[in-house]
Image (cartoon, rainbow, N blue to C red):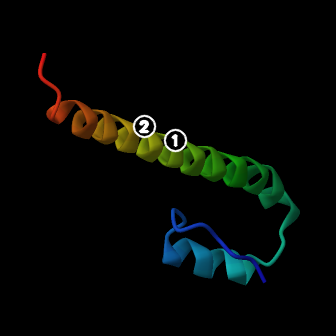
Amino acid sequence: MHYWPEVVPHELVVRLAELGSASELRPVVDRLFPAVAAVFRREIAQAEVDSAVADLWSAVSGVEP
C-alpha cells in the first residue's frame, strides 16, 4: 500500500494501484517524494517569514519615528 502526496490526482493514484510496483515507475517515484518534501519545506519557511514580518509590523506600529 502506498500513500501518495496530495499533488498526485486521484485518477492517477487509481491507475498506479492497478499497476502495482512496476519497476519502471521507481525513478519517477524517487524524484517525486523529495520534490514534494522540498515544496513543503519552502511553504513552512515562507509561513515563518510571513509571520516574522507581521510581528515586525506589530512591533513598530506603536513606535513613533
Which residue does the image show at 60% across and 66% down from the upper left? 5
Q: Nearer the viewer, residue 19 or 59?
A: 59
Residue 49 — which label?
2
Query: Is 38 situated left or right of 7 in this image?
Result: right
Q: Secondary structure at mark 2?
A: helix
Instruction: Identify which amino acid the numbered label 1 is placed on.
Output: Ala
Name the quadrant of the C terminus.
Answer: top left
Q: Residues within 10 Å of mark 1 (few under 14, many from 20)?
A: few
Q: Which mark is residue 25?
A: none
Pick the residue in front: 15 or 36: 36
Marks 1 & 2, CB-CB < 8 Å contact: yes
Say which residue appears at 61% left-offset and 52% top-offset.
36
| The label number, if any, that marks residue 45 in the structure image | 1
Quarter placement of the N terminus = bottom right
Q: Is residue 3 left or right of residue 7?
A: right
In this rendered view, identify the residue nearer to me: 23 or 37. 37
Q: Residue at x 27, y 35 (%)?
A: 59
48 lies above or below 23:
above
Question: Is residue 19 positioned above or below 38 on the image?
Answer: below
Q: Please rate how many residues cluster around mark 2, counting C-alpha atoms within 10 Å: few if below 14, some from 14 to 19, many from 20.
A: few
Residue most extreme to the right? 23
